[in-house]
């Protein structure tokens, strides 16, 4: 298990080539193990910059909170 924290926003291309945004939430159980839940945003984006702008506007994302694949 990795101790590295999971970035809360993942920007990746899907199989159709569209850019998608996934919002990830990390919680810990009573023993301290992380549980990460992923929620895919239904909207697609033309660029990663557009996905970032949407995350900032809708979720209050800050620089450094993004991961890409």
Image (spheres, rainbow, N blue to C red):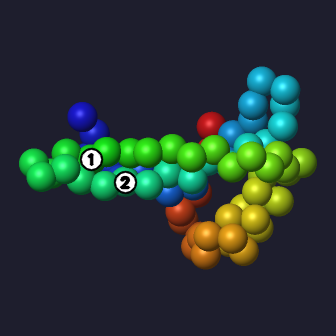
The part of the image, by quadrant, that contains residue 55 is bottom right
Q: Residue at x 69, y 71 (%)?
A: 58
Left or right, 32 with respect to 50, comes to left
Q: Secondary structure at mark 2?
A: strand
Residue 16: give x, y in percent of width and height: 84, 26
The x, y position of residue 56, in whole percent, is 68, 72
Q: Which residue is mark 1?
A: 34
Image point (80%, 49%), residue name: 43
Q: Quadrant of the rendered structure where residue 19 is?
A: top right
Left or right: where 22 falls relative to 1: right
Q: Nearer the viewer, residue 42 or 33?
A: 42
Q: CB of mark 1 within 8 Å of CB of mark 2?
A: yes
Determine the secondary structure under disc 1.
strand
Q: In the displayed image of the protein, which residue is found farthest to the top?
A: 15
Residue placed under numbered mark 2 in the picture? 26
In this view, 50 is above or below 21: below
Residue 62: % across, % down: 58, 73
């Amino acid at each position: 298990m990795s101790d590295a924290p999971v970035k809360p926003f993942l920007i990746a291309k899907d199989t159709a080539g569209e850019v998608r945004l996934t919002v990830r939430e990390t919680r810990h159980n009573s023993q301290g193990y992380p549980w990460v839940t992923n929620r895919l945003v239904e909207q697609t984006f033309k660029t990663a910059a557009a996905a970032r702008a949407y995350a900032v506007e809708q979720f209050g994302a800050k620089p450094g909170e993004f991961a890409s694949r």
